[in-house]
Image (spheres, rainbow, N blue to C red):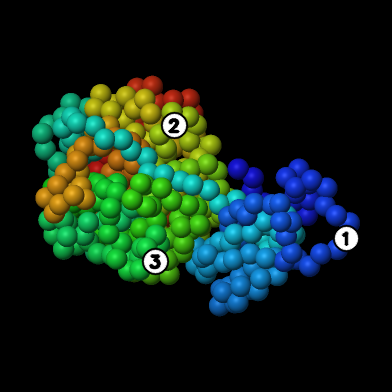
Amino acid sequence: MRQARRVARGALWVAAVVGVLSSVARPHGVRNPQEALSDYLVVLAPGTDPAEVPTKADALARRFGGVVHERYTSGLLGFATRMSPSAAARLGADPAVAYVTDDGEVSASATVRTPPSWGLDRVDQRGKRLTGAYTYPSAGGAGVSVYVLDSGIRIGHRDFGGRARYGWDFIGGDAKADDCNGHGTHVAGTVGGAQYGVAKRVRLVAVRVLDCKGKGSYAKMVAGIDWIIAHAAGPAVVNMSIDGPPSRALDDAVKRAVAAGITFVVAAGNESRDACDFSPAREPSALTVAATDRGDRRAGFSNYGRCVDLFAPGLAITSDWKSSDKAHQVMSGTSMAAPHVAGAAALLLAAHRTWKPSSVRVALLRAASQGKVTSAGRGSPNLMVCTCR
């Protein structure tokens, strides 16, 4: 995926896409009728006043013949727009703009399986021989909010015991971030369900950025992160069990969330490739989580490499489901591994409420079990998450 388009690169790219431009000057907003419109994320120049973002976004979009879909004032200072490729190249050269990058599609990282779950039993001990029990601090993550950036949550599920609430629905454009896919409810259950969760007393907040098919765009991801930064209260963790091609804008939004004091946990991805080839898995400020199976082997689908921070159980994980307030489902993926770490982060923050994300990271890495993962993958740290006390 191409990233920043400044003057020189943008001019070459436009020529490749639309042919040689006419030497006759045109107003910025006039586009070649042969060009198809595309979606872009626009990041404004450093020093832009957040209060001026909506006005600047609208003005720039009008000038370059685009339409604004989202405006960002917290995660990024910028906006999402649709316009022609040539207009996007010219926009990228405007002094009010830091860079323009393609929007793209992302998807949830999981597949349904049928064996019983075992993840909770594994994360509270060093050895891989399961004990049939899960021991956790009595605080259980109380007082910590985990924002589940996903397909929504079935907040009425009895496993959440009234601790789950809606944040915002960026697919439907309203405050009811319900789950018509199931992925988000499953993830939330592993983070903080009373039965299936690592942090059993945590508050869960649904921020819906995936549709009923588990698909979404970078524009929606960034909008969700922007909303979380603006609304996060108290110790906060984000779980983002989503991956896609590299995106500078998405990575920057995650970085800003961490700078705002929010611990950010992401899935490594399910392509059995280097996690550094995907966003937001490649973002260094996030905690990137790869998946293991019951035998402590790296799951065959799991991404790997130096961008991974930790491994966690991700194959055949049982958790809550969207079909009823009692439903459960078994799923596999790095999507299932990440919420084990998000839950572990919440347990730490409940005991150390003033910790910054860097302190949470250090504590999780120090507590991790070393040398347990078989076939971890080239460049991967051999560290298994552990809530051990």
The crowd level at tag 1 (other Cα within 10 Å; few <14, some 14-19, many 20+) is few
* Residue 237 position within the rendered picture, expressed as x and y whole percent measured from the top left: 35, 56
Q: Residues within 10 Å of mark 3 (few under 14, many from 20)?
A: few
Res 271 label: 2
Residue 309: x %, y % from top left: 42, 39
- Horizontal placement of 292 versus 219: left or right? left
- Which image quadrant for residue 167? bottom left
**Numbered disc in front, either 1 or 3:** 1
* 305 lies above or below 153: above
Q: CA distance from mark 2 to mark 3?
A: 31 Å
Amino acid type, residue under disc 2 in the picture: Glu
Secondary element type, mark 1: loop
Q: CA distance from mark 1 to mark 3?
A: 42 Å
Q: Are marks 1 and 3 in contact (CB under 8 Å)?
A: no
The answer to whether residue 11 is visible is: yes
Relative to residue 284, is residue 377 depicted above or below? above
Q: Which circle marks residue 24 in the picture?
A: 1
Q: Amino acid at mark 1?
A: Val
Residue 9 in sight from this viewpoint: no
The mark nearer the N terminus, 2 or 3, is: 3
The residue at which mark 3 appears reads as 173
* Three-letter code, disc 3: Gly
